[in-house]
Structure formats: C-alpha cells, structure tokens
Image (spheres, rainbow, N blue to C red):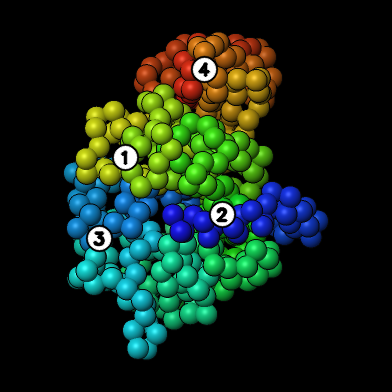
Amino acid sequence: MNTKRIRSGLLSNTCWVGFLLAASILLGCGCAAGAAEARSAPYTGLAATPPMGWNSWNTFGKEINEEVVKGVADKFVELGLKDLGYQYIVIDDHWHGGRDAQGKLIPNPKKFPDGIKALAGYIHSKGLKFGIYSCAGDKTCGGEVGSFGHEEDDAATFASWDVDYLKYDYCHAPDDLQEAIQRYTKMGNALKATGRPMVFSICEWGPRSPWLWGRKGGGHLWRISFDVGDMWDSPHNAYSCIGILAAIDASSNLEKHAAPGGWNDPDMLVVGLGNKGYIKGGGCNSAEYETQVSMWCILAAPLMIGCDIRNMNAETRRILTNPEAIAVDQDPLGKQGNRVARTASTDVWRKPMANGHLAIALLNRGDQETTITANWKDLGVKANESLGIRDLWLHKELGSFRGSFSAKVAPHATLLLRAVRPK
Ligand code: GLA
C-alpha cells in the first residue's frame, strides 16, 4: 500500500487543474503533430494494431515468478488466446533483484532463478512475445530499482534479454511536464538505439496528457487514466483505482490521438478478477466485464488481460475470447471510436472500420434495463441508407435497418454491433 500512498501524493500534487493547463499549453504549441504525421503513410512498424496480451499486475502484484509466467504462456497456446491475437506476456513490477556491481539490472533470484533471458526464450519458443516493466524514477511504484539515470544501460540490458515490450511507469519522478517528456523520450531513444524492436508503453496515467507527446517520445501506447480497479464506477477508491465507466469517460474525445503505432491506453482488463486479484474494487458482474471488453474494442484500446488465465472459468473465457469483438479492436483502419450521443444513463459510440463498416456500442450506464437508439444522423449515415446490423456477442444478424436502430439493453451492459452497408 506504500506504493499507492507514494503515487497518490504525486497525483494530488499534479491534480486535474494542472493536467488541463498542461494540455492547453501543449495544444497551443502544436505538439499533436505526431499523430497527423503517422496517418499520412501506411504504418508498418510496431503496434500497427493495439497490443494484446497479458500483464501480471492485476492478479499477482508482488507475487510474480517464472512458474506463473510460463504457465500463462502455456495457456495462451492451449486455450487459443494466441490464435486470437493475444501475444505479449508482460511481467509488471517486482521482478527485480537490484543492480550488480557493474550497475546492471538483475532479477530477483528467488522469483526468477533461471533469469529473464531464459524466460523470454521460453515465451518465444511458444511463438509469443515477452514484456517487462521499469520506471522513469529512481524507484518503481513498488519501490524496486528504477531506470532513471540508467536509461541506455537498462535498454541495452532489456535488448540483451530479448525483451519485446517495455512498460515504463512514472513513480518517484517530478510532476513537471517537460521533465516527464524528457525522461520518456530518453528511454524511447535508448530503446531505439538498441536496434531491437520493443513496444514502448508509457504509464504516467494521464495527468501530463501523454497523447500529445507520447508518439514523439517513442511510445506505442500511453495510459490515459489511473489504474482501473475491479469495479464498475468509482472516481477513485482506497487503492486510488477508478472504475470501468470512469476509464471510458477519460477516453472520450481522445480519438484523434490514436492511430496505428500509437494508442490511448485506458489500462488493463479487469475481466475475470472476481475481486480475488491483487487489484480489488468489489468485483464486477458478467455484463460489466463484457462492457469493458466491448468498450475497449470500440476505443481501439490495448487488450491486456489481467486475470489468472490458468484458472479462468468458462464465463471469463467467453468474454475474453470473442473473435468478433476482438476484430473490432484490431480493425486495420486503426481508428478509435467516439461517443456520438448521450443521455443521463446511456451512451452511443461509433467506430469507423475498414471497408466502410461501423462498430456501434449501445452502453447502458444505468441500473435499469432501458431502450437505446442509435440514430443514423448521429452515426454520420444518411437517413435513407439501410444498414445490416449484427450483434457481436450473440453472433447473430439482427436484420436490415433504416434511419435508426433501437434495442433494450440490460443494466451496465453494452450491445456491441457491426453495421454493414449492403453491396
Ligand atoms: C502503477 C501502474 C500499475 C502497476 C503498478 C506497479 O500503479 O499504474 O499499472 O504497474 O504501478 O507498481
């Protein structure tokens, strides 16, 4: 909990007023150019679609070790997650054993007796990719050794361990915007200088608007919100986590900053935690977990599973392995969806996809079943145009509709639809 106290201190200093100020300064100086540049040519580099994988933090926190990670890799193959596109297996905080006499990072020998390179080799032998965690402060959020002042050496160490992905946190580091940009850019450049392609995941939680500078700093994804807890809706709980709804709201209006090679990241999936993981919050029901997947797909968000997939139940597996939802997330057009209509308890979201298809989400934020209508004018479709609508959770064509589409949606549920113009 010490971790969270340290971080809360940072967040309260930073606060949303500071964040809004920073955003307006950056907007004024035109630093959003990166996203525009990236759209002018087809992108063929890393993270051409939002990264998909698993991260140890939500379930294991400090209790991570090589047996767990290998077990997860085995299940990725056995349960078909790999075939669905889940690829990166990322060890979060607490893999560390400090630095050796030469200053080189070493893993905790009790947790990772065979070393990190061997573990990466195991993961690669399964056709998967391997990720690790460090921090732009001199300590990580959990108080382990951080990379500040060691960027080049640590990047070289990660490359020598055959790392494919680095999540880079921002604890024990100054609030200052320019300092944050410098620190992330330094590590981004250091990773590039190794010559090994490594996805760079920026994790400063949003207060310094990383969507405006993350891409330039070498990032392929950047957290836009605080940690998502295992809960439906709360601005912050005792662990300084936010709920699923708050993360969705934090993502709205950021769509112009997402494009192949750089994605807004509303944090990992809490699906299947059942309040038993390291990250708590009271737990969610199936409709709420399904909403998280539906909305993360509409948001073209990275899909990083957080539950213990070695022991997941059939319902969790169903929610995490819906190929039609995943296809929305991974759509090659690489557009993040946006909210096009809203009432007190309902949202309609729209995501443009390849071949002129649209993904539509009808989100019931409220506690009562309610009818939600997607109007063609809100979707940017001509009123007289007919769209074929498919329900991506029921895997069923619902028919052809003109002008609008309405459906009853259960409390906290999301209807995820694909709309197709007839040929
Ligand atoms: C921060 C991050 C989390 C996790 C922890 C590890 O809180 O936001 O995702 O990486 O640090 O200590």
Residue annotated with mark 3:
65
- Number of the front mark, 3 or 1: 1
Residue 365, image x, y percentages: 55, 23
Circles 3 and 1, Cβ within 8 Å, touching? The answer is: no
10 Å crowding of disc 3: few (<14), some (14-19), many (20+):
some
Circles 3 and 4, Cβ within 8 Å, touching? The answer is: no
Above or below 149: residue 248: above
Residue annotated with mark 2:
8
Foreground residue, 224 or 101? 101
Foreground residue, 154 or 402? 154
Circles 2 and 3, Cβ within 8 Å, touching? The answer is: no
Residue 146, image x, y percentages: 46, 72
Q: Which mark is residue 276?
A: 1
Amino acid beneath label 3:
Asn
Label 2 beta carbon within 8 A of ligand 1: no
Foreground residue, 333 or 374? 374
Query: Residue most toward the right?
Result: 28
Q: Secondary structure at mark 1?
A: loop
Amino acid beneath label 2:
Ser
Question: Which residue is depicted at the point 41% across and 34% down?
Answer: 282
Of callouts 3 and 4, the N-terminal one: 3
- Res. 83 visible in picture: no
- Mark 4 and mark 2: span between their CA atoms? 30 Å
- Horizontal side of 250 relative to 319 (left or right) equals right
- Number of the front mark, 1 or 4: 1
Amino acid beneath label 4:
Asp
Question: Which residue is depicted at the point 42% across and 73% down?
Answer: 145
Amino acid beneath label 1:
Lys
Label 3 beta carbon within 8 A of ligand 1: no
- Number of the front mark, 2 or 3: 2
Residue annotated with mark 4:
367
- Mark 1 and mark 2: span between their CA atoms? 23 Å
